[in-house]
């Protein structure tokens, strides 16, 4: 039996899989709030007590760079090691993957129902593929064709310098530089970034702040869901929140276009993570595609790049697929 897990800064998703059932049909599955546990080992122990089945191998995808079987998680105070997990959990074989590497591993086996197409484009057979996923943080990965199959590679491109594309974003950069010093794309294009955009637009008087929303935000442990909810309120969208989400979507489009150019993603760009699904109505507006394609002489090339939104739990699917394949070698 395989234990697979998607370890995020907000939640940890664990599941048990068998070779016979495959990576799409977990035998048992549960979700845990990551920050309430001291370690991954603590979560896994609780889950294994719940399911009560013997595990002979495990594969976990983790938000952070995995180097020599070890990762210091980006948005959690954990250090996770393959050897320590194997020893403490008494599981013979344990592998760690970067979370975006796991999503990328799932891309070749995604089905039409797992996707929503934002731009059909004209995919090139065997062309490179880019993956960008704003969730708690901003993950990036890519795939290249080796002549027989796609190979996935992790990246920490989300921590590269934020490059504003208009006057509003220049003001945002300056505002956040004064607060944080270095400003990465993750700082403005993720779950932790949306409140920063909101604060800037509020403090620069871009739109008035609702006193009712301000009261709720002041006591919220995580402000992002409240801002998203207020922005997408169909009856009465909050102007400041909507402006924050629109700015987020424009920045996401620009950085997705940057990544497409860097890996020459003629095979397509895939959006993962939790945020794109939550802001889908704004994502479908022209502003995302316009920001994606606004690359000067390469604008026409980017119009031909397919863009798909992943609607399933691709990281867990990729970790499960990789883990089950370990048993065949």
Image: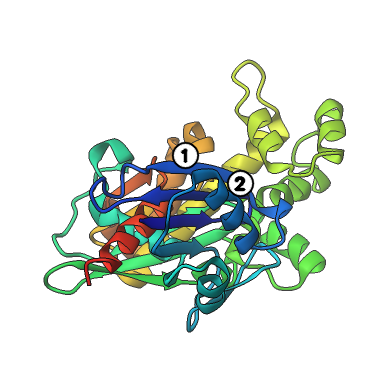
Front disc: 1 or 2: 2
Between 251 and 133, the one lying in front of the other is 133
Q: Residues within 10 Å of mark 1 (few under 14, many from 20)?
A: many
User: Relative to 81, is 206 above or below?
Assistant: above
Query: Dividing the picture into quarters, in which one does residue 311 lie?
Result: top left
Front position in the image: 52 or 230? 52
Is residue 272 in view from this perspective?
Answer: no
Whether residue 212 is situated above or below residue 219 in the rendered picture: above
Q: Secondary structure at mark 2?
A: strand
Above or below 178: residue 169: above
Quarter of the picture containing the C terminus is bottom left
Image spot of residue 233 (x, y percent): 63, 23
**Pointer 2: residues within 10 angstroms few (<14), some, or many (20+)?**
some
The residue at 37%/45% (across/down) is 310
* Disc 1, SS: helix
Q: How many marks?
A: 2
Taking 243 as reference, is 122 left or right?
Answer: left
The x, y position of residue 105, in whole percent, is 32, 61
* Image colouring: rainbow
Coordinates of residue 231 in the picture (x, y in percent): 64, 31
Query: Quick check: 329 above or below 221?
Result: below
Residue 61 in the figure: left or right of residue 218: left
Give the side of residue 312 with respect to residue 234, left or right. left
Q: Are marks 1 and 2 in contact (CB under 8 Å)?
A: no
- What residue is shown with label 2? 32
Q: Give the side of residue 44 with respect to residue 213, left or right.
A: left
Q: Which quadrant does the N terminus fall into?
A: bottom left
Find residue 45 and report its image quarter: bottom right
Instruction: Give the CA distance from mark 1 to mark 2.
Output: 28 Å
Q: Residue beneath label 1, please?
A: 283
């Amino acid at each position: 039996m395989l234990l697979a897990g998607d370890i995020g800064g907000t939640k940890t998703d664990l599941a048990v899989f068998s070779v016979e059932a495959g990576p799409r049909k977990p035998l048992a599955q549960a979700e845990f709030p990551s920050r309430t546990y001291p370690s991954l080992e603590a979560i896994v122990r609780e889950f294994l007590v719940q399911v009560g089945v013997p595990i002979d191998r495990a594969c976990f995808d983790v938000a952070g760079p995995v180097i020599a079987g070890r990762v210091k998680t980006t948005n959690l105070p954990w250090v996770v090691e393959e050897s320590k997990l194997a020893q403490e959990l008494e599981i013979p074989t344990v592998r760690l993957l970067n979370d975006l590497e796991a999503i990328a591993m799932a891309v070749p086996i995604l089905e039409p129902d797992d996707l929503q197409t934002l731009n059909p484009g004209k995919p090139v057979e065997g062309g490179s593929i880019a993956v960008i996923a704003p969730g708690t943080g901003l993950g990036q990965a890519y795939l290249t064709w080796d002549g027989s199959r796609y190979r996935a590679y992790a990246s920490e491109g989300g921590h590269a310098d934020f490059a504003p594309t208009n006057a509003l974003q220049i003001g945002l950069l300056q505002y956040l530089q004064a607060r944080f010093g270095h400003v990465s794309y993750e700082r403005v294009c993720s779950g932790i970034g949306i409140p920063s955009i909101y604060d800037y637009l509020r403090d620069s008087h871009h739109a008035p702040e609702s006193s009712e929303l301000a009261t709720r935000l002041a006591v919220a442990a995580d402000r992002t869901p409240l801002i998203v909810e207020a922005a997408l309120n169909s009856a009465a969208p909050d102007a400041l929140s909507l402006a924050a989400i629109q700015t987020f979507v424009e920045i996401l489009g620009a950085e997705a276009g940057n990544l497409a150019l860097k890996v020459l993603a003629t095979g397509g760009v895939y959006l993962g993570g939790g945020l794109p699904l939550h802001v889908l109505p704004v994502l479908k507006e022209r502003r995302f595609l316009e920001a994606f394609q606004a690359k000067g002489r390469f604008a026409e090339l980017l119009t031909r790049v397919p863009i798909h939104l992943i609607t399933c739990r691709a990281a867990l699917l990729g970790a499960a697929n990789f883990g089950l394949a370990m048993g065949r070698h």
